[in-house]
Image (tube, rainbow, N blue to C red):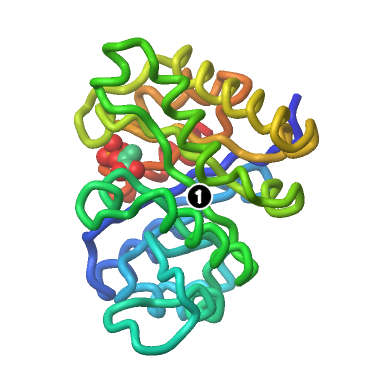
Amino acid sequence: ASARIPMVAGNWKMNFDHLEATAFVQQFAKNLKSGRFDFSKCEVALFPAFTALRSVQVLVDADNLRIRYGAQTVSVTSQGAFTGDVSADMLARLGCSYVIVGHSERRKYHPEDDANIVDQVRAVLAAGMQPILCVGESLEERRKGIELDFAVGQVHDVTRDLSDEEAERLIIAYEPVWAIGTGMVATPQSAQDAAEAFRAHLARTFNDHVAQTVRVLYGGSVTSRNAVELISEPDVDGFLIGGAALHVDELTRICMLT
Ligand code: PEP
C-alpha cells in the first residue's frame, strides 16, 4: 500500500458568495463530524472564489476545522501594479494550503499558457503552498489515441525545470477535458493508466521517491456513484470535483467513500 494520503478537493469555480460559502462549510463540517470522518486518512480541501476565502479562513480557525482550502488560480508576480491579480503570498497569509493551477477553464478562457503555468507553480511553491496542476486531453487527442502522450507532455512542459524537492510537493490532477462537467466519466482503467504514466515520467525526470510521493487526483464528472471504483485504482489518490462539490451531502458522501 502507498503512503500517500488520499485527497478530496472541491472546486467551486465561480459559485457561492461568502455567505453561501460560510453556510456550506458549516453544514459540511457538521456532516463530516456526524459521519465520524477520519481526517488523518483523507485530506479534504475546498476551493472558493477569492471573495469567499477570508470567510472560510475565519470559520476554519474559529472552529478548529481540519478542512483545508485554497485558491483556483494565482498571479505569477509577487506585488505591484497588476490590477485584478492576487499574489501567492496573499493566499498563503490567508491560510491557503493549495492553489489549483492550469485548470482547463483557465487555459481556455484567459488563456493561461505553459509559461504562465510554470510561473504559477513556482510562485505557489515559493509561498509554501502546494500546486494542484491540472492536465488532460481533449476529445481530439483521445480520438487519435495520443491522450497519454499529450497529458504526460503537459506535465513535462510545466515541471521539467523544477528541483526534486519542488517536484515532490506537486499534486497532479488528471482531468480529461471531455469529462469535465459533461457527466462522461473516464473509466477507472484510463484514470489508472494516466496516473501510472505520470509516475513513470516523474521517476525518469526526478527519482522514484518523487514518483511515489506525488499525489495524482482524477477529475471529470466524479460523483458518489463512480468514486469507489476510481479510488480503488492503485495510482489514483483522490479527486478534484466540480459539479458534485456544490452539493454538500453529495460531497460528504464522496469524502466518506474515499
Ligand atoms: C473540474 O472542473 O475540475 C471538474 C472536475 O468538474 P466536474 O466535476 O463538474 O466534471
Q: Which residue is nearer to you in this view: 91 or 81?
A: 81
Assess mark 1: CB under 8 A from ligand 1?
A: no
Q: Residue furthest bottom?
A: 80
Q: Residue at (59%, 72%) from the top-left corner?
A: 64
Q: How many residues crowd around disc 1 within 10 Å: few (fewer than 14), some, or many (20 or more)?
A: many
Q: Which residue is nearer to you in this view: 189 or 25?
A: 189
State the image coordinates of residue 248 (x, y, percent, origin top left). 32, 50
Q: Is residue 210 visible?
A: yes
Q: Is residue 247 visible?
A: no
The image quadrant that residue 115 belongs to is: bottom left
Label 1: which secondary element: strand
**In this figure, which residue is indicated by the disc labeled 1?**
132
The image quadrant that residue 86 belongs to is: bottom left
140 displayed left or right of 9: left
Tag 1: amino acid: Ile
Looking at the image, in which quadrant does ligand 1 appear? Answer: top left
Count up the numbered dots.
1
236 displayed left or right of 174: right
State the image coordinates of residue 1 (x, y, percent, origin top left). 75, 24
| As drawn, 96 above or below 41 | below
State the image coordinates of residue 107 (x, y, percent, origin top left). 29, 48
206 displayed left or right of 254: right
63 displayed left or right of 28: right
| As drawn, 162 above or below 19 | above
Q: Which residue is nearer to you in this view: 34 or 94?
A: 94
Q: Residue at (35%, 88%) from the top-left corner?
A: 81
Q: Residue at (70%, 38%) from the top-left corner?
A: 4
State the image coordinates of residue 15 (x, y, percent, origin top left). 22, 60
Q: Residue at (27%, 12%) from the top-left corner?
A: 143
